[in-house]
Image (cartoon, rainbow, N blue to C red):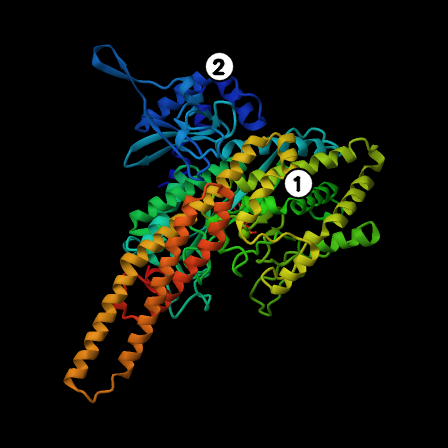
Amino acid sequence: MEKNIVEEVFAKDVFNETVMRERLPKKVYEQLLKTIENGEDLDPSIAGVVAHAMKEWALERGATHYTHWFQPMTGITAEKHDAFINPVAGGKVMLEFSGKELVKGEPDASSFPSGGLRATFEARGYTAWDCTSPAFLKEDAAGVILCIPTAFCSYTGEALDKKTPLLRSMEAVSKEAVKIVNLFPDLEEVQTVSCSVGPEQEYFLIDRDKYLQREDLIYTGRTLFGAMPPKGQELDDHYFGTIKEKIASFMKELNVELWKVGILAKTQHNEVAPAQHEMAPIYSSANIATDHNQLTMEIMKKVAKRHGLECLLHEKPFAGVNGSGKHDNWSLVTNTGINLLDPGKNPHENYLFLLTLAAVIKAVDENAVLLRLSASNPGNDHRLGANEAPPAIISIFLGEQLEDILAQLLEKGTATSIKKGGRLNVGVNTLPNFRLDATDRNRTSPFAFTGNKFEFRMVASSMSIAGANTILNTIVADVFSQFYEELKDVPKENFNQAVTDLVIKTVKEHQRVIFNGDGYSDEWIEEAERRGLPNCKSMVDAIPSLVSEKSVEMFERLGVFNKVELESRVEINYEMYAKALNIEAKTMIDMASKKYIPAVIKYTKMLADSINSVKAACPQADISVQTDILTKISSLLAQAQSALYKLKEADAIGSKMKDVKEQAEFFKDDISTAMENLRKPIDELEVLIDKEAWPVPSYGDMIFEV
Ligand code: ADP
Ligand code: MG
């Protein structure tokens, strides 16, 4: 029988456990597995053997190069290819790959953002093999490349990437969670707790030829101009709609490419906005999920091009319709398979679950601004709080069942019952009648409990999920360590009561962060303010939270970031924000001066000419329509020209600023306003002017004609 395509291709390009078991000596394999699964120190003596097996496998598959694949703070992955060749006598080469080359790389680090961590004259940076994420093959025009996931650090050991802090946070949360879990009767044998993550990736697909005519999309990933077409997303007819043939063929190939590198691509559907779609994989360990999500984004872009499409990962490619995000589903699981966030059948009696829940509530409330920042990039500022994505205010949705349990605990000091879901009955006998979930969903919540995991819905679509998960792990580890201090000396017979008391105390102190209502409503913004919940409208306002005294103490104590690393990230965030807006401003200036304004001038000339020729041919003709349009257009043109001038002036001032914080704030306030002021008249002109005369594809062309 012919093999199913999934069976045929899945993980074909991955040096995973199965391949390692087949190709490594038993001892080496077991040694390596101990590091991968239990976090034991990597035995350096096995690197040579692993490298050899990896090379042989890669060569059989046609590889010519290897690369240390890493995630610098730019947020995209970096790679530098090295051929396996080594010269030998007789003018020949041998194909070699040593243990040293597997374990350590030394890319010139000076051109990656370091936020002052490393002056350019101290350019040394090292990549170190991360054996917990499997090596894989990448095949493209460059041939077949063996990619080795690595962490990227400076000469002095500071993290220059997103992966190192993530790995550190995973170790921290494991360590602190294990201490807590071990206090529970029968759970003394738990040794590690790992963090599972399933990121749902939203994206847009548009026609590549049209994309290439839009400098704003090319340079900034989003449209900086563009009037709404007569139809937007108001009919909600795209969400879960039938997938068009062209898109379906993209999705088919995307799945195959993802499966090949072992990515568990599972769900695909159309999203809310026209031309918007989503792919969700099955969850995996946070580190692998992060690597896989980076790869997913890269492969989406690559496959789209093969289909004459362009994949847009920006958070807000089109104003007026929904933007894209990434739902980061997160949970903690023991090495014995217990999900700490699984409420089980009787959540009110599940003390480990209630304690974990309380820990997350406290962690999120105490670190709301840090969390907000961890999901932020300049693009996401256009989404959060714009009635399509969660608000910028962090709150937690628990659902009816858990709210009820917590209410009972607060009222009576004990929870004695649980609300169960009813049965679905739609009044048609032939349809199945099944038990409903205990709780409905709340799509407006930024941080929602969804059954056995939390779903952090703020994360920016184009961004690495490493940051969000690093923060989540760290803040929860922090609360676990405090809880441990409170519970460690409690006698066994009082343990459940002590946990209950701690849960009650914690929920009392932090219930302000729990909100089950409509997160999009204006009332919530007011209510949140009354509750004292922070509302950072821009990521820029959230940046200082990284280096607050409390954050620095927490990150250092848990070994996730040291102060210098945090300061560098502050610097990088400000810089990244200002640079992104600077590029947007410059792109707008360029498009307005070279495309829109000349096109409008041409059009006004044509109108004027036609008015004159009508007048000449028929002096009595009524030309009020033409002159009216001409007057309107000319007035908008003058507005555009003046706004363009102001934007140029502001950008010149902003570009020269030396202090990164001041600069980011200037771009957030002054430049954004100047940009809006330029966009407005041009978008109005687009509606007035003949389509043939408009110099770029319109929103309608791009999002409805894919
Ligand atoms: P929902 O319908 O609640 O969005 P799905 O079942 O569609 O949930 O899953 C969404 C994402 O969450 C998927 O990537 C899925 O693998 C992931 N997920 C499911 N369970 C867990 C869990 N326990 N921990 C982390 N992620 C999970
Ligand atoms: Mg979801």
Measured from the top left, where is residue 448 in percent x and y? 61, 52
Q: Amino acid at mark 2?
A: Ser
Quarter of the rendering containing residue 516: bottom right
Q: Amino acid at mark 1?
A: Leu
Measured from the top left, where is residue 500 in percent x and y? 79, 44
Quadrant for the N terminus, please.
Answer: top left
Q: Nearer the viewer, residue 548 or 509?
A: 548
Circle 2 residue: 45
Quarter of the rendering containing residue 20: top left
Q: Is residue 104 left or right of residue 2?
A: right
Measured from the top left, where is residue 383 in percent x and y? 50, 55
- Element on which disc 1 rests: loop
Residue that appears at 32% across and 27% down: 65
Q: Is residue 622 left or right of residue 268?
A: left
**Residue 221 visible:** no
Residue that appears at 27% across and 79% down: 626
Q: Is residue 681 left or right of residue 352?
A: left
Residue that appears at 76% across and 45% down: 503
**Residue 603 visible:** yes
- In the displayed structure, 413 sits above or below 706; it is above
- In the displayed structure, 107 sits above or below 329; it is above
Local crowd size for mark 2, using a 10 Å CA cut-off: few (<14), some (14–19), many (≥20): few
Measured from the top left, where is residue 156 in percent x and y? 51, 23
Tell me, for residue 291, which label it has, or none: none
Local crowd size for mark 1, using a 10 Å CA cut-off: few (<14), some (14–19), many (≥20): many
Marks 2 & 1, CB-CB < 8 Å contact: no
* Extreme residue in the left direction: 617
Residue that appears at 31% across and 56% down: 591
Circle 1 residue: 340
- Ranked by sequence position, the earlier of labels 2 and 1 is 2
Q: Is mark 1 within 8 Å of ligand 1?
A: no
- In the displayed structure, 31 sits above or below 311; it is above
